[in-house]
Structure formats: structure tokens, C-alpha cells
Amino acid sequence: EIQFVESGGGLVQPGGSLRLSCAGSGFTFGAYWMHWVRQVPGKGLVWVSHIESDGRNPTYTDSVKGRFTISRDNARSTMYLQMNSLRAEDSGMYFCGGGTGVRGVHYPEYWGRGTLVTVSS
Amino acid sequence: EVVLTQSPATLSLSPGERATLSCRASQTLSSYLAWYQQKPGQPPRLLIYDVYNRAPGTPARFSGSGSGTDFILTISSLEPGDSAVYYCQQHSNWPPYTFGQGTKLEIK
């Protein structure tokens, strides 16, 4: 069974840092493009970042450029999101999602259940 | 950035009825549009990709259509379990990938 499990969320003050992790199992992690998507409870989905299967060409939504860094360790089947200079508007549930092939690289097919980030003083 | 506008915001229908959900793009898309279903407390689930292709496990009751800037998700005969929020997503012009704001479908 393909599974993603996110961790690392929590309460942090504005200006602080967090590192989110997304651990995959049940599949060849190194074959999957991976994404982070944020959702404020009760609101819509917002794409945050993506990374290709071999770690190349990371991309970000404009609001996090220069503050967030996506990375992956295929040997550990884990993706990361380093979040620095956090702002209140970064708060939300962070889902990791991924896929492979012509369908899955741009349309994440498999998702974790999310980890909640709250940025507040 | 491509802005996706979904309508209606909320749709309330009875079992057996047909649901038609709309997604309008701010610029012409290639055929790179998907639909997701999200139920409370769950992550999104991919239903349709590249406008009309059903993802594995998607019932045949779900179909996608459209081109250019206007796209439709149709659910031909609603079941109670179809209650959810439905999102469209594009990768025609990325980054960024963008989602619509969602349509909440309620089954009476």
C-alpha cells in the first residue's frame, strides 16, 4: 500500500522556523514527483512547492520564495520542507502529495493526511 | 498566474440527480486540467486528469469535459457518498500550479 506520512508541524512564533517531513512507503519513492499543498481549515487548496523525482528543478509559489526550501532524500524515502521567516499567512494544514508517470507528476495521486502549522504569537 | 474560478460555490441536489460543476480559467489552457474530490478530514482525491481521463478507481458516473477556458465536471447520478468539495487544478502554465476555490456539493 502506498503511504505518505507528514510530520513536523506545530505552533511557532512569527519569524520562526519549522521543518516538515513527508515519509513515503510502499512504492519506489525515487520515481515520484512530490508536492506540498497548504489548506487553511475550512478553506481551499493552495499549491506551495514541488520537486522532481531526482531532486532537480524545485519550484515555489511566489509568497514563499526565498523563505521555504524543498528537498528530498530518496535513500530515506523522505521529502522535506524547510520553512523560515514564518508568517501568520503560512498557517494551515500542509499535505504532501506525489505521483509518477504522465498522470502523477503534475496531478498528485497519493496524499498524506497532513501536518498542521500554526504561526502565532 | 492562471486563476481558476469555480461555480457555483455550493450545489444542493438529491440522489439520482445530475450535477454540473464549472471551472473557468483566466487564460486558455492546454488540456492540463484536473478535478479532485475532498471530504472532511481527508486529503484530496484525484478524480479526473487532462480534462476527461478518469483516474484509477473513479466511477464512470464522473466525467470531465471542456476546452480553452471552460471546463465541466459532471456527476451523472448522484449518490449520498458524493457529498464533498470539488476542486479543479491546472498545470498548463506552471509554476505555479493553481486550484480553483472549490464547489461544495451537498446531497439532500
Image (tube, rainbow, N blue to C red):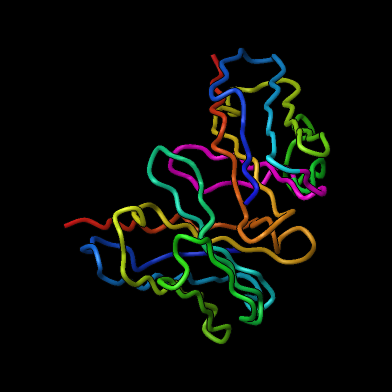
Q: Position of residue B85 (x, y in %)?
A: 54, 33
Q: Position of residue A25 (x, y in %)?
A: 56, 71
Image side of residue B46 versus residue B41, left or right:
right
Q: Which of A108/A64 is in front?
A: A64
In this view, which residue lies farthest toward the bottom? A75
Residue at the spot 60% in from the left edge and 70% down from the top edge: A26
Q: Is residue B102 above or below residue A83?
A: above
Q: Which of A71/B29 is in front?
A: B29
Q: Which of B44/B81 is in front?
A: B44
Q: Quadrant of the C terminus of chain A?
A: bottom left
- Magenta segment: does it hold B90? no
Displayed quadrant of residue B95? bottom right
Q: Position of residue B99 (x, y in %)?
A: 59, 45
Image side of residue A99 versus residue A91, left or right:
right
- Magenta segment: does it hold B43? yes
Q: Is residue B103 above or below residue B11?
A: below
In this view, which residue lies farthest toward the left? A121
Q: Which segment is the magenta one?
A: B28-48
Image side of residue B67 versus residue A108, left or right:
right
Q: Quadrant of the N terminus of chain A?
A: bottom right
Q: Is residue B101 above or below residue A51?
A: above
Q: Which of A33/B79 is in front?
A: A33
Residue at the spot 52% in from the left edge and 83% down from the top edge: A76
Residue at the spot 65% in from the left edge and 41% down from the top edge: B88
Q: Position of residue A10 (x, y in %)?
A: 27, 62
Q: How many marks?
A: 0
Q: Is residue B98 above or below residue B17?
A: below
Residue at the spot 44% in from the left edge and 73% down from the top edge: A66
